[in-house]
Amino acid sequence: MAYGVTKERGAQFGAESPAGTPHAATFIWRGPANSIQDTRKIDNVGERENVRYSAPLARLNMPEIGAAYTMPDAEVTFEQGPVILNASIRPLLTGVADTGVGHTAVIYAFPFPTTVSDHTFTPYTIEAGNNNLAHYMEYSFADKWGMSGVSNQAVKWTGVHFTGRQRTAQAFTGGLTPAAIEVVNFNQGKLYVNNSYATLGNTQYVNGWLGFNLACMPGLLAQPTGDGQLYFSFVKPTGVKMTGDLTVEDDSDATGLETDWVAKTIKYVRMKFEGSALVGATYTKKTLIIDQCLYISSIDTLTSQNGNDTKKVHFSTVYDGTALFANMTFVNALAALP
């Protein structure tokens, strides 16, 4: 008899083309793994019958089937980071090579869509389970994800949730080995806060940035129709929404943010994290850049960390109408994602 072992869990991904056609996994997700949840609905029609019994009779109907994969929180890496954005924001399996003699830097840029007509994504087949039982689900997309960072820790993916068409039992695709990856660390990040797109990334928020949270709702809706199947027919974009917060020192810069909040000043914010060295004209290190146009929605009262007063600044990301809503860029050395 096989018994499930936690250390032998795994999650593997394979990009689909066309969407909805299961594809063998091409890489192992490096991080904690979970199992795929079967989200089918069972309706006991018999509970609503009046057939002269006081006890509910068993007459079952299954009006829909579906599947979901909730990814355990994991460190963000320069190499695997684009996967989540591929599955939610923009299809980009092949990066753009940076310029320069002997370049090694490859750029994966994800401008967030400002119209639904601009919003497409890469669907994945996800395999997950353990040594006892594994399943796959096709037409998988990330309909919710978050990112967070705090001093002296790695930046992490939080609350990543995938929806898929159905769960099917199948052994893992074999022959794959974990790829080399590099973690994004908060302490290697810098925060820039400016009042115009032209000055985005010019003014660093020095000695005051302690942490952040992002929560993204990509606005991808699994749409069921009368199309001959119990699973959803297609995925419809309905509009991206992103909110978050910054934890900062209670200093004169924080007081300036309070002034901006009261004045309803739109802010242009960049978070930039760097890693090991690369060769390129634009990028010389592995990089994660998060650019946002935002407004401050609220600022919490003072909190204390080891006797040090801090403030948490809450924001919502908005489109300025011409230049910026949100962009996320990963730079690594991969010419293409596996």
Image: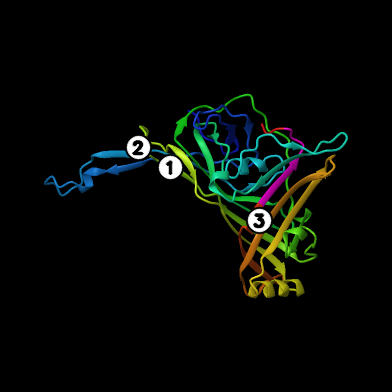
Relative to 32, is 186 on the left or the right? right
Residue at the (15%, 49%) spot, across then down: 54
Front residue of 164/222: it is 222
Secondary-structure class at tag 3: loop
Dominant SS type (magenta): strand
Which amino acid type corresponds to the residue marked 3 in the rendered image?
A: Thr
Residue at the (73%, 57%) spot, across then down: 270
Reading the image, the residue beneath label 1 is 223
Q: Is residue 308 visible?
A: no
Query: Can you tell which mark lies on residue 58?
Result: none
- Give the magenta-colored segment's residue range: 327-335
Reading the image, the residue beneath label 2 is 226
Mark positioned earlier in the residue sequence (1 or 3): 1
- Whole-Å distance between the Cαs marked 2 and 3? 40 Å
Reading the image, the residue beneath label 3 is 322
Mark positioned earlier in the residue sequence (2 or 3): 2
Q: Residue 230: percent from the left, percent from the top?
A: 37, 36
Front residue of 199/287: it is 199
Secondary-structure class at tag 1: strand
Name the mark nearer the viewer: 1 or 3: 3
Secondary-structure class at tag 2: loop
Tell whether position 332 is magenta: yes
